[in-house]
């Protein structure tokens, strides 16, 4: 890939323009997954619909994002990262405006689903842009910086959403996206088109089966709380999703041009890293859901104050992720991925001290600082290990697979939350959620400790027949 300077990938120097474009593009996609949470009561008060509408305003976005992100990664490798990124940014701007102007709840839900389609184009293309423009330690450092800001978007979403809702209107949660998107499009004007285009046909059947599989299963998990497992509303989509996913695997094994090349999983760090991702991101989704919910509905904090409790995690991510990314590039990712989740688990266990009346310094400060340090130690090395295990020409689809894994892990964890820890929000509910979160993080650390390798060639060769699109 060529950058604004016209030079090739560097092993020592960061391309700051590429990095800024990648961060801004992914930031808005990650932010809109969490920023909406604290605005839901205001949306329901204005548009009506109660709890079902609140659920679908969140889930419509996450379902389309998770279901289509693999297709987006394939398109990124085929048509070029910058082209796909530009289309995604324009689409995200248009759909954000539609959401902000929504006259009815139904209109907003449809707008959120379309916003998820555009968001799916942003994440894999942005990370592939970084891996194509950097090599060696510079790549690991760049991934660390990207991870810091995108993780910050994930954690800071409730804070930003609370402030915009309290000071202006819930509609600004969507309209504010136009500002970073405009800046990103301006910065992209000086980037030369990358050379990722190819003639390999898109695996549309695989894309359809993957989308139906993920969408059907996630729909069933969400709606089982409303209709029960025996309802046709749940059984039908669940069976459709399971059959579609089975068909997807068969299709990817047999087609000459798979959307998700299964040969990627022959690279040990790619397979193990994605297994660790399931545990770590399921835990992160659970933990960052139960803590703010309890603080609002149990401890009586406002939406903004509940979001601010986890702000130290964001600060530590921004401050230290690039450093840990550099260390992973120098020493390997294994022990960062093994130790970081366990430290984060200790942080969540320290939050067992949270009670009523709430005291941030006495009950939560130590926990969120330890959590932030452990999470920061984990995420950048995890991303570096996964992307470093595959050929650069597959970085778009590799990023898409990993992001799909993390989004679906979070979706499933939240969908099963009531069945796992109950629905009555009190101190015991919080404790059960924190213990489950800590347990999942420990599992992620153990998987990494025994599975990740830091051998000399961290990029393991793929089979010759699957090394790159033909």
Image (tube, rainbow, N blue to C red):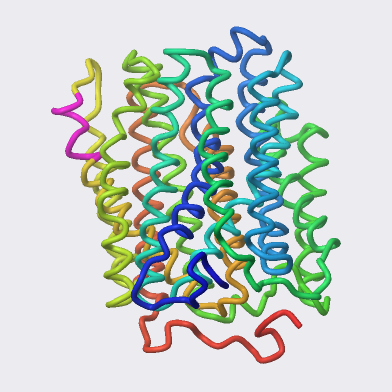
Q: Residue at x 31, y 49 (%)?
A: 317
Residue shown at 58%/27% (left/top)?
174
Residue drawn at 73 percent across, 14 percent down: 104
Q: Position of residue 299 (x, y in %)?
A: 31, 17
Between 262 and 170, the one lying in front of the other is 170
Q: Mainly helix, strand or loop, the magenta region?
A: helix
> Outermost residue, right direction?
205
Quadrant placement of the C terminus: bottom right
Q: Is residue 242 above or below residue 436?
A: below
The magenta stretch is 360-368
Q: Position of residue 31 (x, y in %)?
A: 50, 38
Q: Quadrant of residue 210?
A: bottom right
Q: Which quarter of the figure is the N terminus placed in?
A: bottom right
Query: Magenta span has 35?
Result: no
450 or 57: nearer the viewer: 57
- Quick one: which residue is furthest to the bottom in this view? 464
Q: Nearer the viewer, residue 437 or 252?
A: 252
Q: Say if the magenta span includes residue 365.
A: yes
For residue 175, side relative to residue 64 (left or right): left
């Amino acid at each position: 890939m060529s950058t604004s300077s016209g030079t090739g990938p560097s092993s020592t120097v960061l391309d700051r323009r590429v990095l800024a474009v990648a961060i801004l593009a992914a930031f808005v996609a990650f932010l809109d997954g969490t920023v909406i949470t604290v605005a839901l009561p205001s949306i329901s008060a204005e548009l009506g619909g109660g709890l079902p509408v609140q659920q679908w305003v969140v889930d419509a976005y996450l379902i389309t994002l998770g279901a289509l992100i693999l297709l987006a990664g394939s398109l990124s490798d085929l048509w070029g990262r910058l082209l796909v990124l530009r289309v995604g940014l324009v689409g995200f701007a248009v759909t954000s405006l539609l959401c902000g102007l929504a006259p009815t709840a139904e209109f907003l839900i449809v707008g959120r689903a379309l916003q998820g389609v555009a968001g799916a184009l942003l994440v894999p293309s942005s990370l592939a842009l970084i891996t194509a423009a950097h090599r060696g330690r510079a790549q690991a450092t760049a991934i660390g910086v990207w991870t810091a800001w995108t993780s910050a978007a994930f954690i800071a979403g409730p804070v930003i959403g609370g402030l915009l809702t309290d000071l202006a209107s819930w509609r600004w949660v969507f309209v504010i996206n136009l500002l970073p998107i405009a800046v990103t499009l301006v910065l992209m004007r000086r980037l030369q088109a990358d050379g990722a285009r190819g003639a390999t046909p898109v695996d549309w059947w695989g894309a359809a089966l993957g989308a139906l599989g993920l969408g059907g299963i996630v729909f069933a998990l969400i709606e089982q709380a409303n209709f029960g497992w025996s309802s046709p509303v749940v059984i039908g989509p669940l069976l459709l999703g399971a059959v579609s996913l089975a068909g997807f695997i068969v299709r990817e094994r047999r087609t000459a041009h798979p959307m998700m090349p299964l040969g990627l999983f022959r690279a040990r760090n790619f397979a193990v890293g994605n297994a660790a991702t399931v545990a770590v991101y399921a835990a992160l989704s659970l933990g960052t859901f139960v803590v703010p919910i309890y603080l609002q509905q149990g401890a009586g904090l406002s939406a903004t104050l509940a979001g601010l409790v986890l702000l130290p995690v964001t600060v530590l991510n921004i401050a230290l992720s690039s450093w840990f990314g550099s260390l992973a590039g120098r020493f390997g990712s294994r022990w960062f991925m093994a130790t970081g989740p366990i430290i984060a688990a200790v942080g969540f266990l320290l939050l067992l001290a949270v009670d009523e009346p709430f005291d941030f310094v006495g009950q939560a400060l130590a926990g969120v600082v330890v959590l932030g340090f452990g999470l920061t130690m984990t995420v950048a090395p995890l991303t570096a290990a996964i992307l470093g295990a595959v050929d650069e020409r597959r970085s778009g689809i590799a990023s898409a697979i990993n992001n799909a894994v993390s989004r679906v892990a979070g979706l499933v964890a939240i969908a099963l939350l009531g069945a796992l820890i109950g629905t009555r929000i009190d101190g015991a509910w919080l404790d059960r959620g924190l213990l489950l979160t800590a347990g999942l993080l420990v599992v992620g650390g153990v998987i990494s400790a025994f599975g990740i390798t830091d051998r000399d060639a961290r990029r393991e060769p793929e089979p010759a027949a699957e090394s790159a699109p033909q």
